[in-house]
């Protein structure tokens, strides 16, 4: 797919390290989120996704943690990464509220607009990461939610 290759060529990725510990003085929650996003990108690559961009922030609001292509079905995927240390407050995916879905959708639509609103199949996935005893476990929720109202494409 030419458009996806074009998108990938526009952006460069960093952070192909293995699991790391937080630096001294680093906020543990911020570290957990950043580390989760980095590990999720690596996990996605290993499971048939081509990572195109990380941490996309739209000019007028909206955000997407990982933009990638699912090579198995040639679909553009906007991924939200949720990382937790326990299930005490529910699964990580349950934290993707309706308001969060709107924020992700706004970012996805802004990214598509920057590309000229191509006719392309896309979906929204969630990668759940649970750190139990410093060992991450992963779960991909494919097509986790649809484009929420009032957004259309």
Image: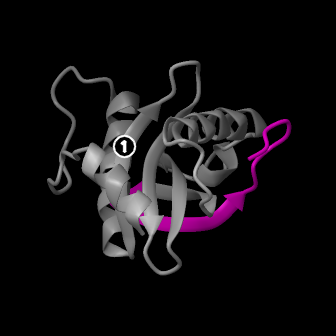
Mark 1 surroundings within 10 Å by alpha-carbon count, few (fewer than 14), some (14 through 19), many (20 or more) = many
In the image, residue 102 lies at what x, y percent?
72, 35
In the image, residue 8 lies at what x, y percent?
31, 53
Q: Quadrant of residue 98?
A: top right
Q: Quadrant of residue 46?
A: bottom left
Is 108 in front, or is 6?
6
Q: How many marks?
A: 1
Q: At 54% across and 41% down in the image, what residue appears? A: 116
Q: Which residues are magenta?
A: 131-153
Q: Is residue 152 visible?
A: yes
Is 32 in front, or is 106?
106
Q: At 53% across and 58% down in the image, what residue appears? A: 77
Q: Quadrant of residue 141?
A: bottom right
Position of 5 with respect to 152 (left or right) is: left
Q: At 19% across and 45% down in the image, what residue appears? A: 14
Position of 116 with respect to 24 (left or right) is: right
Magenta highlight on residue 68: no
In the rendered view, tell whether residue 5 sits above or below residue 54: below
Position of 29 with respect to 149 (left or right) is: left
In the rendered view, tell whether residue 105 sits above or below residue 4: above
In the image, residue 92 lies at what x, y percent?
58, 51
Q: Is residue 133 visible?
A: no
Disc 1 marks which residue? 54
Residue extending farthest to the right is 149
Q: Where does the N terminus fall, quadrant-wise?
A: bottom left
Magenta highlight on residue 136: yes
């Amino acid at each position: 797919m030419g458009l996806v290759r074009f998108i990938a060529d526009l952006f460069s990725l960093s952070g192909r390290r293995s699991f790391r510990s937080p630096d001294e003085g680093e906020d543990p929650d911020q570290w957990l989120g950043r580390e989760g996003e980095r590990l999720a990108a690596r996990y996605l690559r290993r499971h048939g996704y081509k990572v195109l961009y990380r941490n996309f922030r739209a000019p007028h609001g909206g955000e997407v943690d990982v933009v990638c292509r699912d090579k198995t079905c040639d679909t553009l995927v906007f991924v939200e990464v949720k990382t937790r240390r326990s299930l005490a407050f529910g699964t990580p995916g349950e934290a993707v509220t309706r308001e969060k879905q709107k924020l992700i959708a706004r970012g996805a639509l802004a990214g598509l607009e920057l590309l000229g609103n191509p006719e392309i199949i896309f979906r929204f996935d969630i990668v759940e990461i649970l750190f139990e005893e410093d060992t991450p476990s992963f779960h991909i929720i494919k097509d986790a939610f649809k484009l929420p109202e009032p957004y259309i494409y």
